[in-house]
Image (cartoon, helix red, strand yellow):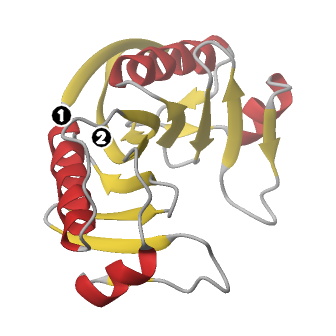
Amino acid sequence: MLYIFFEKYINEVSILEYKIRIENIVASGNLGTFVPLHQMVKKVEGVEYEPETFPGLVLRMKNPKSAALIFSSGKIVCTGTRTKSDLKKAVNNIIKAVRKAGVKVPRNIKVQVENVVASTKIDARLNLSKIALEFENSEYEPETFPGLVLRMKNPNVAFLLFSSGKIVCTGGRKRKEIEIAIEKLIKSLKKIKAIEKI
């Protein structure tokens, strides 16, 4: 886990410490070949395929715990991993499963990270009403949902903020983007005095 130390000014100068945790990596790729999904249902365990409701096949994997959508065009979407090494293992599991159905899959397929979901918790309360008033790019309806959605353009991410200090970041493609975004968010919240000492 990554530790970041941040100065905050609330009555006196103190250090705000938080850890960023990757919750989910969503990646996509293409196997470069037609995949007979009906054949996979017969030969591979742990698959769900209901073509009348959804055109893709769902493959659930245990090690690492993850899931994949596989389409007959060869397109794949993998979700549920938390590290790049687990993502690589999951993609290899997908390739093995497709090969079990008798499909020749090229050795190297290109996989691209589409979205990384990360979370952190700061040791302070967030004044969501103040944040909603100060930022146009926010949505806050406390009677419907306790979190506030805040969108950032550079880097292009979205945050889900809770008054408890929990922060969820989505939309980044690299860990560095997420680190920059969270640091920038905390600076902005500090500037409007929306971080309150517990």
| Residue type at tag 1 | Met
Quadrant placement of the C terminus: top left
Q: Name the residue under label 2.
A: 21
Say which label, 1 or 2, has the lower sequence index: 1
Q: Is mark 1 on a helix, strand or loop?
A: loop
| Residue type at tag 2 | Arg
Q: Is residue 114 above or below residue 163?
A: above
Q: Name the residue under label 1.
A: 1
Give how far across and how far down residue 173 sits, in percent: 45, 28
Q: Are marks 1 and 2 in contact (CB under 8 Å)?
A: yes
Give how far across and how far down residue 105 sits, in percent: 26, 51
Q: In which quarter of the image is residue 60?
A: bottom left
Residue pictured at 53% horizontal, 69% vertical: 56
Residue pictured at 56% horizontal, 20% vertical: 185
Q: In which quarter of the image is residue 28?
A: top left
Q: In which quarter of the image is residue 178?
A: top left
Give how far across and how far down residue 49 sits, in percent: 48, 83
Q: Mark 1 and mark 2: span between their CA atoms?
A: 6 Å
Say whether residue 162 is left or right of residue 33: right
Q: Is residue 193 above or below residue 118?
A: above
Q: In this view, does 152 lie above or below 125?
A: above
Say whether residue 129 is left or right of residue 100: right
Say whether residue 140 is left or right of residue 31: right
Q: Is mark 2 on a helix, strand or loop?
A: strand
Say whether residue 4 is left or right of residue 68: left
